[in-house]
């Protein structure tokens, strides 16, 4: 039998144990130190970011001098970089690589997917290894948070349908350059500019501080170096400050971030850093103006090759050719999960496994399609979006403009109208629906040519222009794709 006193003691014991467990959990959380945040999932895939970064890095080797991999500075920066990389959780990390540019000015930049470049001027300006590690950790944090890919999403939001009445969708810059421009990465003559927001900077400071802390450096060193940069500003601030706007109270924000982290014994300097800094002072460096001038004449591409500074990380260009056989349905079938895509004056939802591709030049279309559904001969699976307007000075009804569009598609694409024009309502407008038929760029399962269904849908705009969509799939498979096409149309908001 349990007495009343025994029950009270039992309850008190349980209460004390619960409190002790809670305290242990709290202490464990504190002593564990800061944890890396989830960087999120921008619309651009990791592979796309990586490929763009590699191509951009190859361009750096063409437009700027780069020290060979065997140089003391490059070897040291790579060792330090790998020490920082080791702190990042594998599921969030990237294949970081580290390069050194013999430029006098203080700067550093990281490209999408991991290539990171440090100027000699940054090495010689740092007081100690911790400060240099702070700059590198900050740049790595931009890659970790995928800020460039998120910048591309913002660019699509503000500019994808600019110039609608002139039948121009998206930026006039196309191809590789256009994709990088969307990401806030721009090349000039011997210069590279990355544009980050103050919000991006705050995040890069916070994540960079975690990298430093876990690598055994005082995160305050990052703030110290930035303070040194600002003191050297004057009328011509370092390029790094132009690319990385101060989010405000940077030093205090970093102090606030780290004040409750468990104390540890920090490394500040190393003999390797001082040896590298001393040697870096003897390396021939170039000013930004000299580099820009040399880029115009191809000087750096030639010099880098002679010095053995050849970029080997760039992927070999993949030949684009007509498909040799039928496409796997697994590679092109739309996901049931739709994600919102903001195209400026128009929003719609798309399958999350289909990518948005910007036009390569004025007048070309925006495409939303699976990568495997696109060939050099055209799109076999997906959606094409564009706009047309009446010739300047002329007025045409939307029906007249639609008829002309159909005729233009028939002449240019070898398509033919396969049914009557029907009315269709979506996005708050009354549009037109026209079935077309052409030849698919993908062969049928027997290897023979197959018919393609091209569902044309047009929507009049208040300025007299016409936005149109062409939903594409082989005739034999179109009905399997129709629910997704109809869902995309229903989601349109002008």
Image (cartoon, rainbow, N blue to C red):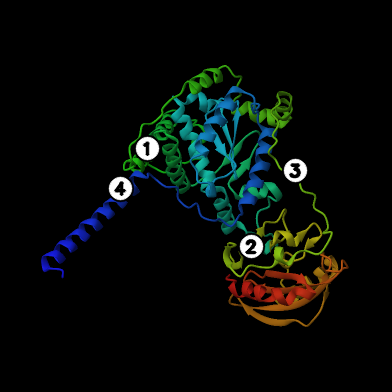
Task: Select label 4 or label 3 by which is in front.
Answer: 4
Disc 4 to disc 3, C-alpha distance: 51 Å
Q: CA distance from mark 1 to mark 2?
A: 41 Å
Query: x and y percent of residue 464 in the render?
Result: 66, 70
At a point 32% along the width and 41% down the height, the residue shown is: 259
- Label 1 sits on a secondary structure element that is helix
Label 4–label 3 contact, CB within 8 A: no
Disc number for residue 353:
2
Whole-Å distance between the Cαs marked 4 and 1?
Answer: 27 Å
Q: Is residue 180 left or right of residue 474?
A: left
Q: Nearer the viewer, mark 1 or mark 2?
A: 2
Looking at the image, tell me whether mark 1 or mark 2 is earlier in sequence order.
Answer: 1
Q: Which mark is residue 251?
A: 1
> Residue 397, relative to residue 83: is it above or below?
below
Quarter of the image that includes the C terminus: bottom right
Q: Is residue 191 above or below residue 375?
A: above
Q: Which mark is residue 316?
A: 3
Upstream in sequence: badge 2 or badge 4: 4
Dividing the picture into quadrants, the one containing residue 296 is top right
Quadrant in which the N terminus appears = bottom left
Q: Tag 2: Cα neighbours inside 10 Å, few (<14), some, or many (≥20)?
A: many
First in residue order: circle 4 vs circle 1: 4
Assess whether mark 2 and mark 1 are in contact (beta carbons under 8 angstroms).
Answer: no
């Amino acid at each position: 039998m349990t007495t009343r006193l025994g029950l009270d003691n039992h309850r008190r014991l349980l209460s004390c144990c619960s409190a002790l467990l809670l305290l242990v959990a709290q202490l464990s959380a504190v002593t564990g130190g800061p944890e890396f945040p989830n960087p999120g999932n921008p619309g651009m895939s990791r592979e796309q970011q990586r490929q763009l970064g590699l191509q951009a890095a190859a361009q750096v080797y063409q437009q700027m001098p780069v020290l060979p991999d065997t140089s003391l500075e490059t070897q040291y920066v790579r060792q330090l970089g790998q020490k920082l990389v080791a702190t990042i959780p594998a599921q969030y990390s990237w294949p970081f690589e580290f390069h050194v540019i013999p430029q006098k000015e203080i700067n550093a930049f990281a490209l999408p997917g991991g290539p990171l470049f440090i100027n000699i001027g940054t090495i010689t300006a740092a007081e100690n290894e911790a400060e240099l590690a702070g700059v590198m950790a900050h740049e790595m944090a931009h890659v970790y948070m995928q800020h460039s890919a998120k910048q591309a999403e913002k660019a699509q939001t503000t500019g994808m349908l600019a110039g609608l009445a002139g039948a121009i969708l998206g930026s006039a810059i196309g191809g590789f350059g256009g994709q990088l421009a969307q990401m806030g990465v721009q090349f000039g003559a011997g210069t590279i500019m990355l544009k980050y927001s103050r919000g991006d900077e705050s995040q890069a400071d916070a994540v960079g501080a975690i990298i430093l802390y876990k690598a055994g450096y005082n995160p305050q060193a990052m703030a110290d170096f930035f303070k040194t940069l600002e003191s050297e500003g004057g009328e011509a601030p370092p390029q790094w400050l132009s690319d990385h706007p101060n989010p405000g109270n940077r030093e205090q924000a970093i102090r606030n971030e780290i004040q409750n982290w468990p104390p540890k014994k920090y490394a500040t300097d190393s003999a390797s850093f001082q040896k590298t800094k001393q040697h870096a002072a003897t390396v021939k460096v170039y000013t930004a103006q000299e580099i820009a001038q040399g880029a115009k004449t191809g000087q750096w591409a030639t010099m880098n090759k002679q010095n053995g500074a050849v970029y080997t990380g760039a992927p070999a260009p993949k030949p684009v050719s007509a498909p040799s056989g039928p496409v796997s349905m697994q590679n092109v079938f739309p996901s049931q999960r739709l994600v919102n895509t903001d195209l400026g004056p128009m929003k719609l939802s798309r399958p999350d496994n289909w990518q948005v591709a910007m036009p390569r030049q004025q007048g070309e279309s925006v495409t939303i399609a699976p990568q495997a559904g696109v060939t050099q001969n055209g799109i076999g699976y997906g959606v094409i979006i564009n706009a047309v307007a009446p010739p300047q000075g002329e007025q045409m009804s939307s029906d007249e403009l639609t008829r002309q569009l159909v005729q233009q598609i028939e002449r240019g694409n070898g398509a033919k109208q396969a049914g009557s024009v029907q009315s269709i309502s979506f996005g708050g407008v009354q549009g037109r629906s026209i079935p077309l038929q052409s030849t698919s760029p993908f062969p049928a399962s027997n290897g023979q040519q197959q018919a393609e269904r091209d569902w044309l849908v047009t929507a009049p705009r208040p300025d007299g222009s016409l936005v149109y969509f062409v939903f594409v799939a082989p005739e034999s498979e179109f009905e399997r794709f129709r629910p997704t096409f109809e869902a995309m149309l229903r989601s349109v908001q002008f």
